[in-house]
């Protein structure tokens, strides 16, 4: 074991150790808890930075532990892992800051932050997994560690939502487990390999491989909220805002989408996946999800629910990009993994700030909120415009690559889906923006509760992260061609996949 | 090295608890100390056996130098050693827990107990009952421990009968330590079932002796290698029926839930984790060793079907229970069903050692996880004064260590990674898939889903409610932390499978490659 | 039919008789007696097995002796437990099986 192996373990430990320490700390020691949280998050960022640098220079990192013959825990990084790991590490840091501000003075913070750190450990573990079994282990850990966060409020409603959440995600996990075990019976242990790892059995077991693929997509599709497996997501909105932010932008939904990308690229490989005829089905599922999510979002008055259905729709852009057989669209899909994260987390941060500061939960109550909280509303606007796909924001880059990629791949129908989706995005986001900036406030806010320590429009720990992520949405859109941007990175990994 | 190789550690793991039992009986005041000493010291012969196994393979010992058939011969192969190790781990933890459970300070001296919810019995009688239980628990438990180890090391059918009987009697007496009428009824029913099972077993043993003139397992195996006498299947059937009764395989499980749910918490843990596994162990010895020649595929499949029915019925019953300990007890009924999937899967050529390893890893994982569940249920019951799920939420919230331990155990029972339960199910799943026995895959999937559902009925409790916490009766810290320790071991089993299964392979009756997967 | 075979069959008949009583009789003492009858049946069978050859086989004797010791202690425990069941419930019978939700 040298540093190259240890650094991956350290990345995991930088949130696992804080989780354990936080559980052991008494509820009252608020300062220590915050310090440990932010310390761990900062350390993780640094370590991920180091590894990103290494991967960029074609350095390899890996570490493994045999659980059984043919069943090994394997951590190994490639360009795709680092895309997801960087996203998680960065957004974890910001969400922690936000959560500390958001939960100021509320009970049971020890439990919250303990499971919060566990959840991030699982997410990073998913990013660093080098084979299917390791992926599965962290995937299930993610399910378990997010349940306490979803039911955190302890109300009857949140417990019901938690039950639904577990039913869906454990069902998905079970399906995935069966698929992985079946694949192992066919092919032996499967490590993620650029270009696919199953060529040696492709001819002998084509029908079985088709079934395994379907089962895997079913299992992963639950977390990725592919229609009709999305039922848990809008209900999980009862969770506190930082949890929703993390669930939607980084952890759960992304884990599902990331898994689908892994299965298509690094287990089957694009060639085999299209050879067994899986790609059109996947693309169709993604297209249906994109349109269905947007349509449902239109009619939601609850702001967080509207954002939730928007997530259902947006995450499938990733799946769509992967399912179109062609390098340009693939760049669009993988880069959206990051872009959607930044945009959606901005929106959730802002929605949480509105709720926490003014007690505003519904779209119909948002009139004039921009006058009271201009900075937050500005961040929200940037996130929303990005989602619609207005240039030069991040969302535009995604849609551009998806559109041109689809054209190149000879699938122009995708462009119609994109156009329809963009129109729907505009239809459910623009009224919010309009109401926030241009309508006069209808009356006093539901609750004028400015959190303790607030000087400006709201607590700086709520405002700061929203502004940072909003700024990032602009930067990664404007400077998309600069080195080390998500787009550059996505091109790098797609080039390796399509070699 | 010859000295270490010849040291009869096997005798040690039986004699030490036996001596402890006598000492605890003679000095009741010192009983907890004696018990804890045994729990610590027993690791010396246990690890000694392990080292002998690893370095010298299967070990034999003839007690007092008397050879079979009249003498008592002991044998330690990988299977035996692994289970002795399991007994030492779970038994040691339960001992630590029991020291707190039975040895609590008098309640009148502690003001915090004055707000305790009213129970059915007066304070004084409960205290007196506990003193009595403490005096009886330690000798009985240590005796049970000795019987268990003796059973695991026996290589002769009649010794198996005697140890099974010793085990059953001490287990029944332990259940009867709970004074409630319902517990006494459960103990009586358990005793009758256990004796009936033993007698069926004994009749089978007599038939075997009549037909083959030997009771030694390896000799029987050799004798059955040739033409099988018509009496052999009858004998095997009788013995199996008796053992299934003791193992509480569906539909012979009726006695288990009341007995396990109404016993004192440490006893419930011991019964569910260890005692039912003993008769399962004997079944393995019969079906895969002595009677390997007489056991047909159809019979193996039949056991598998019963196991599948147990998984589904037990899980369904666990979903319906309103008391925590009954829920956990029905979960045992379900989990025992998985063990019997070993029979059809291990019989198949492709499954082989993978299924064998999966079934036995299931035994280990379930022992640890189920002990944790019963121990944490006991802590909660002690704190709340009852174990009705509906009214347990506040108590669970006030005891995060116990809640966390229960959650870890549930992870293993459901079969989620990383845990011993996951490894076990993974192995069984691979065996079933490798041999294309789809039906068992479906059973496992359904059982997993149902296990998640009934575990969630408990796991949601810590999150119920928003009000601040009322004071709860405290339980000794040692109870909570020993439980958590075993829960962490359950999790640890998810990482230690490779060496454990290598040990299991020593002298295993089922061969074949370990798990790698992939078509040849 | 040889004498040992007769004894062996009688032993098995005793076993069956005891089994019937164990299930059919409600009173605990009857059940305990039934188990003893079953045990005696098995012992008789074993003795019959020992008497098959010219020289009596010592092994079944050892088994029966041990078996008797076990049976006596089991009976003692069962009787003690039956007394407590009667003291607690008023009747020396098994209580109705607890309904799952009781």
Image: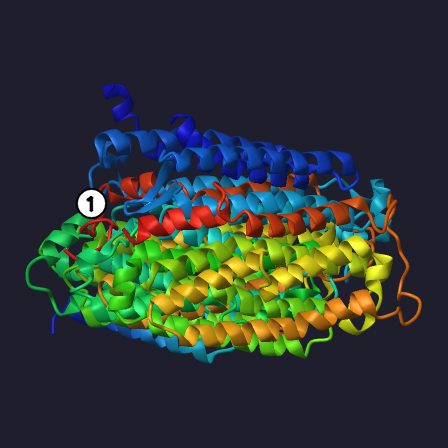
Is C15 displayed left or right of B32 in the figure?
Answer: left
Residue at left offset 56%, top offset 60%: A395
For the C terminus of chain B, the quadrant is bottom left
Give coordinates of residue B227: x percent, y percent. 6, 63
Give coordinates of residue B315: x percent, y percent. 49, 69
Is C1 displayed left or right of B396 in the figure?
Answer: left
Residue at left offset 76%, top offset 71%: A363
Q: Residue furthest right?
A: A444
Chain of the residue where label 1 is placed in the rendered structure: B
Residue B230 lies in what quarter of the image? bottom left
Which residue is tagged 1?
A: B69
Q: How many labels does the image show?
A: 1
Q: Is residue B49 visible?
A: yes
Q: In this view, does B502 lie above or below C79?
A: above
Give coordinates of residue A106: x percent, y percent. 80, 51
Q: In this view, does A96 lie above or below B55?
A: below
């Amino acid at each position: 074991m040298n540093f190259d192996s240890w650094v991956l373990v350290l990345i995991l430990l930088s949130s696992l150790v804080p989780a354990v320490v936080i559980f052991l700390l008494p509820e009252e020691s608020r300062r220590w808890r915050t310090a440990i949280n932010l310390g761990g998050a900062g350390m993780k960022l640094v370590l991920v930075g180091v590894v990103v640098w290494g991967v960029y220079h074609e350095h390899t990192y890996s570490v493994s532990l045999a659980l059984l013959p043919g069943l090994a825990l394997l951590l190994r990084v490639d360009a795709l892992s680092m895309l997801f790991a960087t996203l998680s590490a960065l957004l974890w840091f910001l969400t922690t800051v936000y959560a500390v501000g958001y939960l100021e003075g509320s009970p049971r913070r020890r439990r919250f932050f303990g499971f919060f750190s566990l959840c991030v450990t699982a997410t990073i573990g998913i990013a660093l997994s080098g084979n299917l079994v390791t992926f599965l282990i962290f995937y299930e850990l993610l399910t378990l560690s997010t349940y306490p966060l979803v039911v955190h409020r302890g109300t009857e409603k949140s417990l019901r939502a938690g039950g639904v959440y577990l039913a869906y995600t454990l069902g998905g996990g079970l399906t995935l487990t069966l698929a992985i075990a079946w694949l192992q019976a066919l092919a032996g242990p499967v490590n993620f390999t650029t270009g696919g790892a199953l060529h040696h059995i492709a001819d002998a077991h084509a029908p079985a491989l088709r079934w395994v693929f379907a089962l895997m997509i079913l299992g992963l599709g639950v977390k990725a909220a592919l229609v009709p497996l999305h039922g848990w997501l809008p209900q999980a909105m009862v969770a506190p805002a930082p949890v929703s932010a993390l669930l939607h932008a980084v952890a759960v939904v992304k884990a599902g989408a990331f898994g689908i990308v892994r299965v298509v690229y690094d287990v089957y490989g694009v060639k085999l996946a299209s050879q067994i005829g899986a790609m059109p089905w996947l693309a169709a599922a993604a297209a249906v999800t994109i349109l269905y999510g947007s349509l449902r979002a239109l009619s939601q008055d609850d702001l967080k629910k509207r954002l939730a259905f928007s997530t259902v729709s947006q995450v499938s852009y990733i799946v769509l990009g992967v399912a179109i057989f062609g390098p340009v669209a693939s760049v669009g899909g993988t880069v959206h993994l990051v872009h959607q994260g930044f945009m959606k987390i901005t929106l959730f941060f802002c929605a949480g700030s509105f709720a926490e500061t003014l007690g505003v939960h519904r779209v119909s109550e948002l009139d004039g909120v921009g006058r009271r909280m201009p900075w937050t509303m500005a961040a929200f606007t940037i996130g929303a415009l990005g989602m619609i796909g207005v240039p030069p924001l991040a969302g535009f880059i995604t849609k551009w690559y998806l559109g041109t990629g689809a054209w190149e791949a000879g699938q122009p129908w995708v462009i119609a889906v994109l156009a329809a989706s963009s129109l729907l995005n505009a239809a459910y986001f623009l009224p919010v923006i309009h109401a926030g900036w241009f309508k006069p406030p209808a009356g006093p806010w539901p609750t004028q509760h400015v959190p303790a320590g607030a000087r400006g429009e709201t607590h700086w720990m709520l405002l700061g992260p929203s502004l940072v992520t909003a700024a990032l949405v602009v930067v990664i859109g404007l400077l998309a061609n600069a080195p080390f941007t998500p787009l550059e990175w996505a091109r790098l990994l797609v080039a390796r996949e399509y070699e | 090295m010859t000295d270490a190789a010849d040291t009869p550690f096997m005798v040690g793991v039986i004699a030490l608890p036996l001596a402890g039992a006598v000492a605890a009986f003679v000095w009741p005041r010192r009983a907890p100390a004696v018990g804890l000493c045994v729990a610590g010291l027993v690791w010396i012969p246990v690890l000694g056996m392990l080292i002998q196994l690893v370095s010298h393979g299967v070990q034999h010992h003839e007690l007092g130098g008397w050879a079979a058939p009249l003498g008592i011969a002991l044998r330690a192969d990988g299977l035996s050693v692994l289970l002795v190790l399991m007994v030492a781990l779970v038994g040691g933890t339960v001992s630590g827990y029991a020291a707190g459970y039975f040895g609590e300070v008098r309640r009148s001296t502690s003001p915090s107990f004055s707000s305790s919810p009213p129970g059915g019995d007066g304070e004084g009688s409960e205290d007196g009952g506990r003193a009595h239980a403490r005096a009886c628990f330690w000798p009985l438990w240590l005796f049970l421990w000795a019987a268990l180890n003796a059973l695991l090391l026996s290589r002769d059918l009649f010794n198996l009968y005697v140890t099974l009987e010793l085990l059953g009697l001490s287990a029944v007496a332990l259940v009867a330590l709970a004074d409630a009428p319902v517990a006494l009824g459960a103990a009586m029913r358990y005793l009758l079932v256990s004796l009936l099972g033993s007698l069926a077993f004994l009749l089978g043993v007599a038939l075997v002796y009549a037909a083959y003139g030997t009771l030694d397992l390896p000799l029987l195996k050799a004798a059955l290698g040739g033409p099988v006498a018509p009496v052999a299947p009858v004998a095997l059937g009788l013995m199996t029926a008796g053992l299934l009764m003791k193992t509480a395989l569906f539909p012979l499980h009726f006695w288990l839930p009341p007995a396990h749910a109404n016993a004192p918490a440490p006893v419930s843990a011991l019964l569910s984790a260890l005692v039912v596994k003993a008769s399962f162990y004997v079944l393995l010895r019969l079906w895969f060793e002595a009677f390997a020649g007489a056991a047909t595929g159809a019979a193996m499949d039949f056991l598998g079907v019963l196991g599948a029915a147990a998984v589904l019925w037990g899980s369904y019953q666990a979903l319906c229970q309103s008391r925590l300990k009954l829920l956990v007890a029905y979960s045992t009924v379900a989990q025992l069903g998985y063990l019997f999937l070993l029979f059809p899967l291990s019989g198949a050529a492709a499954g082989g050692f993978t299924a064998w390893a999966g079934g036995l890893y299931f035994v280990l994982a379930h022992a640890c996880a189920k002990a944790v569940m019963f121990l944490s249920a006991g802590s909660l019951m002690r704190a709340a004064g009852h174990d009705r799920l509906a009214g347990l939420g506040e108590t669970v919230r006030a005891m995060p260590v116990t809640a966390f331990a229960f959650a870890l155990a549930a992870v293993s029972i459901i079969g989620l990674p990383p845990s011993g339960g996951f490894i076990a199910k993974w192995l069984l799943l691979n065996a079933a898939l490798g041999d294309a026995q789809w039906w068992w895959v479906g059973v496992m999937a359904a059982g997993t889903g149902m296990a998640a559902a009934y575990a969630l009925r408990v796991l949601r409790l810590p999150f119920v409610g928003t009000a601040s916490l009322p004071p709860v009766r405290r339980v000794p810290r040692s109870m909570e932390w020993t439980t958590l320790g075993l829960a962490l071991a359950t999790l640890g089993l998810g990482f230690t499978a490779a060496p454990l299964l290598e040990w299991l392979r020593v002298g295993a009756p089922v061969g074949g490659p370990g798990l790698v997967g992939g078509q040849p | 039919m040889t004498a040992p075979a007769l004894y062996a069959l009688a032993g098995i008949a005793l076993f069956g008789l005891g089994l019937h009583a164990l299930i059919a009789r409600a009173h605990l003492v009857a059940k305990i007696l039934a188990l003893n009858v079953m045990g005696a049946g098995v012992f008789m069978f074993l003795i019959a097995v020992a008497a098959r050859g010219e020289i009596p086989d010592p092994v079944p004797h050892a088994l029966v002796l041990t078996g008797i010791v076990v049976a006596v202690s089991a009976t003692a425990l069962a009787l003690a437990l039956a007394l407590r069941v009667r003291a607690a419930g008023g009747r020396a019978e098994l209580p109705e099986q607890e309904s799952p939700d009781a």
